[in-house]
Amino acid sequence: MTRKQRRLTMIVAALAVLAIALGLVLVAMRDNIVFFYSPAEIVAKDVKPGTRLRLGGLVKEGSVEKGEGRFVSFIVSDGNGEVRVRYTGLLPDLFREGQGIVAEGVLEDAKSFRADSVLAKHDENYMPREVADSLKKQGHWQVDQKTTGK
Amino acid sequence: MIVEVGHYALVLAFALCLVQMVGPMWGSLTRDRALMAIAAPVSIMQFLLIALSFAALTYAYLVSDFSVLNVVENSHSQKPLIYKISGVWGNHEGSMLLWVLTLALFGALVALRAKRMPEDMAATALSVQSWVLGAFLLFVLLTSNPFARIASPPMEGRDLNPLLQDPGLAIHPPLLYLGYVGLSITFSFAAAALIHGRIDAQWARWVRPWTLIAWMFLTVGISMGSYWAYYTLGWGGFWFWDPVENASLMPWLAATALLHSALVMEKRDALKVWTILLAILAFSLSLLGAFLVRSGVLTSVHSFASDPQRGVFILLILVFFIGGSLALFALRVQSLKQGGIFAPISREGALVFNNLLLTTSCATVLVGTLYPLALEAVTGDKISVGPPFFNLTFGPLFVPIFMAMPIGQLLAWKRGDVLGATQRLAFVIGLAVIVGLMLAWVRGEPVLAVLFAALAAYVIAGSFVEIWSRVTAAGYDIGLMWRRAVGLPLSSWGTAIAHAGAGVTLFGLAATGWGVERIAGMKPGDNVDLGPYVVTLDDVQRRPGPNYIETAAFMTIREGGVVVGRLEPSRKFYAHRSMTTTEAGLRTIDLGQVHIVIPEQNSDGSLDVRLYWKPYVTLIWIGSIFMFIGGGVSLADRRLRVGFARRPSRKDAPAAQPSAAE
């Protein structure tokens, strides 16, 4: 091979790998990215039922109902909107009424949500950042709640 | 008083940095030997001062000096001794002190070996290292002073975050920092090479051992962190594609690429521009990681208390060093003499392929990590990029790396023979197929697990083909083979062991496909089937610990009625922080593990227990230990060879300077 051909081979190989990587990233971006919404944003942005999303907010006091097996239902609120979440499975240890959580799952309609995972905060200082931001935006932020934590 | 000494030592170290930033750099440019000569002793002094400062903070923790804010916030007088020590770096300020200590340590180590390098290169590299060190010392002193006192000391501290009260904290951060921060030294060498325009095979010879050290510690650091998360976070997983995990994976990928490209530079005097760029990028990714972890821009288990001021400061450091080094690179790259272009099918061609895939996979991780930040900044939409994204992008790029690994080892420099290499691998490929078929028969579905396990077997066996053929070249007599094996260069052994280690890790990852997961409501006396085992809950007890109350479940694992092990998963409640941690019950059986986590007790007294059976899971971490050992073996060889090169290089060290201009 001449010098030119060798260089060309290298460049073609590099471009091929980059193209494959780019393709993979684009495909993965299309199918595997989940948007975060608060209950009020679901209404405001008119999110379509059937969309997969992450829902965040506070668990409304007195809204937790346990059902058969490990079925549980509760209301997530951000002060300006409420969505009822249905979930079957183990709740995280720090799941409490009045605390911030993030649920991932599918929106059934603007007021109901089927979750397949529920995340809670790690310790008493920590709140999922998205939840803290959206609470700030809705004007329900209390000074003693901090997003610090580890 | 001791605390003030620590603070003062830190300020002094910063003052020395100011001297070091200018003196040796100026000396190296003006050929002033006296100025260059200060570099090594000053670097060692910096290290001693920061070590003193670190010791002072450790002392404050040991005696529970609650007049120091940092101790109040992160310690408690009843905390066990080991957590008093490891608690020093279990918080933002203390971990920054560990960071600067590691920076200074690498500077001092280079200083001790500076005589083996041309004066001007050593002086400039140490000077650049002091620029980095100075920037971070300033950051510590201005925004994160661990020695700050409080006016009215409380009687008791607020205790360390219970999640961190674990032996993992004593091991994971120091190892990780040795790796993360160790890359700073290759960065300093790269900057020095650019400043002096001396980028040659010799440079690669100096830099490769340092890269190797950083890479070794980064490997085990990441791996230990993953094991820690595995047994303490209670999700049964070991890698979550958490942004902060990615922040450590990216420098690892870049360092792995650098390790291989420096080899090409050393042996063939090619890929020079690329290697320098990689050296800069690897440390830049470390800095990016530091920014992501400490600025609070990401949600993560690792996020420290966020403070916008700190974020901005680190961002400035980031911009200064990445921007500065890339500008220097752009300025100098024209004047670099291009190395040879070589045949695509050759050892160096294979190493280029490796670099191409490693850097591309690194780029996909970067995209996945930063895309949510970028999108939120531009559109305000909040998204999460989870494991599916990374599995889909990162996985396919890593498969060819594993496939090429044994082939690359068998290709000759300059002109290789893929067909010949594949023929020599025929036996190994056959072996991998047999392993795959056996696993398919014994373990069955999923197909992907079988395929990856077979690939792993191919990598492990293939790593040793080169050694095997060299050992048996003179016949199959045991004594002769032993003598030949001992006579092989250690770097060959190192490569083989490290590559096999990667294969071992891959096998562990593949085997996760055969794992069994159960969630069961259990009361004392209940049995649950878990893969080949039956797990019995014998009893649940509450018992007090030094600074927590523990609820422990006593469980027995039986196989065919025979007891194979006992487990005690527990939950610890820490009253000082009103926080609970999960201690998974782990029992290693062969190479797999039974992993059991108990959540809170239900109102009816039963427990919703999570049980996992993970065959071969320990191989994931064992593989990283092999990689570490492989690196160490290779390093032992390098030291010998650097020693060889020393005699001529010392003699013509003055003469080497004019040759730099060629």
Image (cartoon, rainbow, N blue to C red):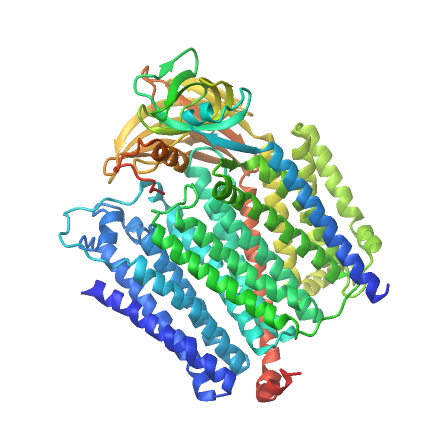
Q: Is residue A111 left or right of residue B259?
A: left
Instruction: State which quadrant residue A91 falls in.
Output: top left
* In the foreground, A81 or B624: A81
* In the foreground, A27 or B43: A27
* In the foreground, B610 or B348: B348
Vertical arrangement, residue A42 with respect to residue B194, above or below: above
Percent x, y of residue B403: 72, 47
Instruction: Identify the residue at the far top of this view.
Output: A68
Q: Is residue B468 visible?
A: no
Identify which residue is drawn at 41% across, 25% down: A40
* In the foreground, B135 or B353: B135
Identify which residue is drawn at 76% across, 44% down: B429
Percent x, y of residue B513: 60, 32
How many labels, in total?
0
Vertical arrangement, residue B489 with respect to residue B408, above or below: below
Q: Is residue B370 left or right of residue B479?
A: left
- Check the picture and name the quadrant holding the C terminus of chain B: bottom right
Instruction: Identify the residue at the far right of this view.
Output: A1
Instruction: State which quadrant residue A26 falls in.
Output: top right
Percent x, y of residue B58: 28, 58
Percent x, y of residue B417: 83, 58
- Check the picture and name the quadrant holding the N terminus of chain B: bottom left
Vertical arrangement, residue B86 with respect to residue B618, above or below: below
Q: Is residue B124 visible?
A: yes
